[in-house]
Every structure is written in C-alpha cells, then in structure tokens.
Amino acid sequence: MGRRNLDTMRAADLAWNERRWDDYAALIDDELMIFASGEEMPHHKAWHINRAKAFCIAFPDARLDMAPYLDLFMSHDGSKTCSVATFSGTMHGSLRRGNRLIAPNHRRFSITLMAICKWRNGKIVELREFFDTVLFARQLDIPPA
C-alpha cells in the first residue's frame, strides 16, 4: 500500500504540472478535506480543483519540481505521505486574494511547498498544504492575504 501511495503522489504531482485536471481529480477522493496555508477553513475537492485551475491561469508556468523532490516519504504503515518540493512560477494573469483581484505584474516566485496526504483505497482523502504565504506575497510584491 505505502509504495503505491508514493507512486500515486508522484502521478498526482505530474498530472498537476501537466494540467491534466481529469487525471489529477481521479487521484483525489470525492470526500477530500484540504487544509491549506493562508486559508481559515478546510475545503473540499471541487474547491481544490477550481483553485488549482485558477492558479495556473494566473501562473501558467507554475511547476512543482519533482526531479528530485526535496523530500518524499511515507508513514510506517503507508497510509500517509509527505512531499516537500520547490514550487515556482511567474504571475502572467490576475490573482484573486480574498476579495481583491491583483493585476499581473510578471514577477516570479519560488517557495518550498510541503504536502501531507492521507490515503484511502489509493486516493487522497486529506491534504494539508504548507508554504510560506508571506514569502510568496513578498516575492510577488503583492499584499499578504
């Protein structure tokens, strides 16, 4: 189970990088709960997929560097995985931050992103994304969320 979950984590990240949203969504359980840095409340699958698509419109070159991950490991029983990677991109489109719409400024960001996933039947059921929201905003020269 564990090794398969690590392989599926890689497949999910690759699908995200390649914008294959149907493939990405197929690896996520319909009951997904996501807890993300900068967000006050957890969200569900549809919100997560829509947020990813909107982000990629604003940052069309955004990529998670998987070659190699900074770190990739699993819990002793394989039910949880953790990936740590460099995440970067350039702001070529508008970005929604809360109630504000920020115009593109063509600035680049490069941050460390950590994702902890809980797995059930080969799909992600819980996702905790951690990144430095202040550094992200500072690199883009935008107000923090």
Image: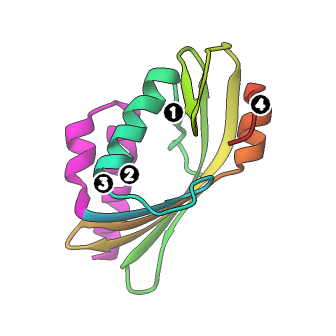
Disc 2 from disc 1: Cα separation: 13 Å
Whether residues under marks 3 and 4 lie with C-beta atoms below 8 angstroms apart, the answer is: no
The residue at which mark 1 appears reads as 63
Q: Establish if 131 lies above or below 78.
A: above
At horizontal 44% and vertical 22% (from top left) the residue drawn is 57
Residue 47, image x, y percentages: 35, 48
Q: Earlier in the sequence, mark 2 or mark 4?
A: 2
Disc 4 from disc 1: Cα separation: 16 Å
Residue 120: mark in rendering? none
Q: Earlier in the sequence, mark 2 or mark 1?
A: 2
Q: Establish if 102 lies above or below 38.
A: above
Whether residues under marks 2 and 1 lie with C-beta atoms below 8 angstroms apart, the answer is: no
The residue at which mark 4 appears reads as 139
The residue at which mark 2 appears reads as 10
Q: Earlier in the sequence, mark 3 or mark 4?
A: 3
At horizontal 61% and vertical 33% (from top left) the residue drawn is 88
Instruction: Identify the main secondary structure in magenta.
Output: helix
Q: In the image, which is nearer the foreground, mark 2 or mark 4? A: 4
Disc 3 from disc 2: Cα separation: 18 Å
Q: In the image, which is nearer the foreground, mark 2 or mark 1? A: 1
Q: What's under tag 1, amino acid-wise?
A: Arg
Whether residues under marks 2 and 4 lie with C-beta atoms below 8 angstroms apart, the answer is: no
Residue 55 counted in the magenta span = no
